[in-house]
Amino acid sequence: MSDSANRPLDVLEASVGGTVTVQLKDGDVYEGRLAGYDQHMNLVVEEGEDTTIIRGDNVVSIRP
């Protein structure tokens, strides 16, 4: 795997449509389907019928 494939946005791109677990600075954890993201790592996570928009600077970790 090349170094460019290990960049955070590349990992997010590969995870779109799949299940992710997102941990926030305040300890909250969201698990659902990654519906989208932007260059600031703002995330859109769908949990069942709920859609959550997560601001990128609140994210501690994202696990695909």
Image (cartoon, rainbow, N blue to C red):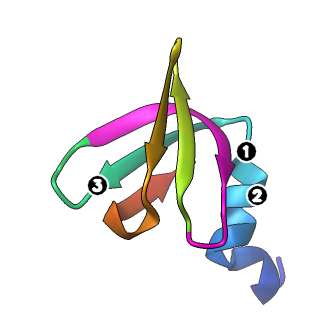
Q: Is residue 6 left or right of residue 26?
A: right
Task: Mark 3: give few (<14), some (14-19) or many (20+) Cα within 10 Å.
Answer: some
Q: Distance between the Cα atoms at labels 3 and 1? A: 19 Å
As helix, strand or loop, the secondary structure at mark 1 comes to loop
- On the image, the x and y values in percent for residue 13 come to 76, 57
Q: Looking at numbered disc 2 in the image, what kind of residue is underneath it? A: Glu
Q: Which residues are magenta?
A: 29-40
Which residue is outermost to the left?
Answer: 26
Query: What number is the disc on residue 24?
Result: 3
Q: Which residue is mark 1?
A: 16
Q: What predominant SS class does the magenta segment belong to?
A: strand
- Label whose residue precedes the other's in the sequence (3 or 1): 1
User: From this viewpoint, which residue is outermost toward the right?
Assistant: 2
Residue beneath label 2, please?
A: 13
- Mark 3 → mark 2, Cα distance in angstroms: 20 Å
Q: Pointer 1: residues within 10 angstroms few (<14), some, or many (20+)? A: some
Tell me where residue 48 appears, x and y as whole percent. 52, 14
Residue type, mark 1 in image: Val
Classify residue 61 by image quadrant: bottom left
Q: Is residue 37 magenta?
A: yes
5 and 23: which one is in front? 23
